[in-house]
Image (cartoon, rainbow, N blue to C red):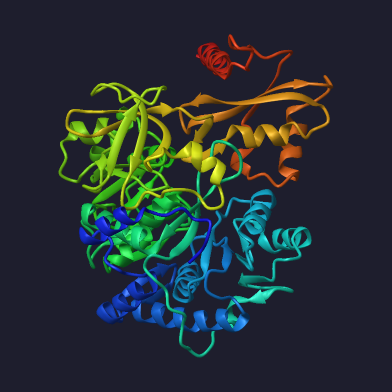
Amino acid sequence: MLTKCPTWPKEFAEKYRKMECWRGETFGGMLRERAQQYGSQIAITCGETQISYKELDMKTDLLAAGLLKLGIKKADRVVVQLPNIPEFFEVCFALFRIGALPVFALPSHRQNEISYFCEFTEAVAYIIPDRYAGFDYRHLARDVCQKLPSLRHVIVAGDPEEFQPLTRLYDDPVSYPDVSPADVAFLQLSGGSTGLSKLIPRTHDDYIYSLRISAEICQLDQDSVYLAVLPIAHNYPLSSPGVLGTLYAGGRVVLAQGGSPDETFSLIAKEQVTITALVPPLALIWLDAAQARRNDLSSLEVLQVGGAKFSAEAARRVKPVLGCTLQQVYGMAEGLVNYTRLDDSEEIIIHTQGRPMSPFDEIRIVDENGCEVKPGQTGELLTRGPYTIRGYYKAEEHNAKAFTQDGFYRTGDLVRMTSSGHVIVEGRAKDQINRGGEKVAAEEVENHLLAHPAVHDAAVVSMPDEFLGERSCAYIIPRDQTLTTMEIKTFLRDRGLATYKIPDRVELIDSFPQTGVGKVSKKALRKVIAEKLKATHKTKM
């Protein structure tokens, strides 16, 4: 078992097994069972490529054997940075089968993040596509290898150049290591508010439970067709119910390369898609596009929207415009997931972010002193349960702050709960920007800005945005008055920062407003930029 991963106390683990939350399943075993049950039924569609359950299981076996032959063994960490392509599933299930751990990176991550993931996890391998969305990942791999000579293997799906080709790893099946359901299956990334992402250890037991319950709530079965629009390494399209929940239910996954209506609307019609998941900005684009087009979207039964709060005004448009049921999803990679149910009233679906999916989810809503608030009042959400982690990987100091002594995870989300038990998200307690579902840690970006020789001080805050919900604004006190916005953005890009983390706006300022104790008042900065944007909008009108 992987060390340095806090886990559930024995009495909780026994309780979850006794209550049949954890049924002793592993991902490798799950795929084998589905292959036996569904055989030639199609599991994955990507363009003209169709992969059956039986074929996916067979390819998993062959690749698992090749990875073992390469020297990758049980509990080894492997950074996986693959987009929405069939190889994502082959790689992940092969790693699951041998007990090695995928570390899920996103296609948008660059050198800064990837180097950190590889170094922090002591990864033995890094798996990438050759090119995707105009970016050459082999260039990125070269930079990472130069920085981390301890990285033993770079494996490429596509043209490998000097690296190891994925296609040559497939080998004759062998006997595989024993994998326990209690073992950590993979490491996911948190949307951390204090810098680079913390790593979330998910076990076979807890994650498969979340898939099973999600699939039940979303009423998935072997006739379900899930369109994967968002990057599937994200927890939301991976498991809520996502691509893995769809495979658990015996359904079919259709892979899209982006969320544009130009691609997705025709896919819905062609593949008879029944369910898909979006973030609010993308949902708004779909709503506008659907009114101007004549695509046949009649197969679509459920549109999930999550990742950030969906406005009631937009939520109200989903059924009349798209002809399907809206399902609001609010959750976190650390565990807890809330859904509106498909048979909830319109009022609940439009105005809340759902209720916990498991009867074993425990919820506390507390004030700044840690005391529970009165029903209906706003406070910080704390949670624990059979699929909510008890601590991050190799983060003992942070865990002491992020978790209570009795194991509740401090989400940093400000919520209130209705009398019916539904959650309404009101905002964030942490210093984090939710840019259309992508979480940007202000501290991380500030640290990069402070590395610029012409920057004296920096504060990154959220600013309201009609489309994304929030964008980022960097307030900078310059040492040099010739400093420009373009120079700052180029500097951050050259440092390997992911594109979505680069501030959308840069404001040069002489000094920061302060709180009563002399700290930078980010509340005041947010107010300044919000008023400035409002004034600009009025002027344009």
- Work out whether 61 lies above or below 117: below
Residue 351 lies in quadrant = top left
The x, y position of residue 224, in whole percent, is: 26, 62
The x, y position of residue 476, in whole percent, is: 71, 22
The x, y position of residue 83, in whole percent, is: 53, 60
In the displayed structure image, the side of residue 19 where residue 46 appears, left or right: right
- Which residue is drawn at the image coordinates 42% and 53% (left, top)? 229
In the displayed structure image, the side of residue 76 where residue 478 appears, left or right: right
- Which residue is drawn at the image coordinates 44% and 67% (left, top)? 46
Is there any visible trace of residue 316 in the rendered image? no
Number of labels in the image equals 0
Residue 144 lies in quadrant = bottom right
In the displayed structure image, the side of residue 167 where residue 234 appears, left or right: left
Task: State the residue in front, 179 or 229.
Answer: 179
The x, y position of residue 50, in whole percent, is: 40, 74
- Work out whether 276 lies above or below 376: below
- Work out whether 118 lies above or below 426: below
Is there any visible trace of residue 510 in the rendered image? yes
Residue 51 lies in quadrant = bottom left
- Which residue is drawn at the image coordinates 63% and 72% (left, top)? 155
Task: State the residue in front, 302 or 371.
Answer: 371
Kindly give the residue lying farthest to the top in the view shown: 516
- Which residue is drawn at the image coordinates 62% and 64% (left, top)? 123
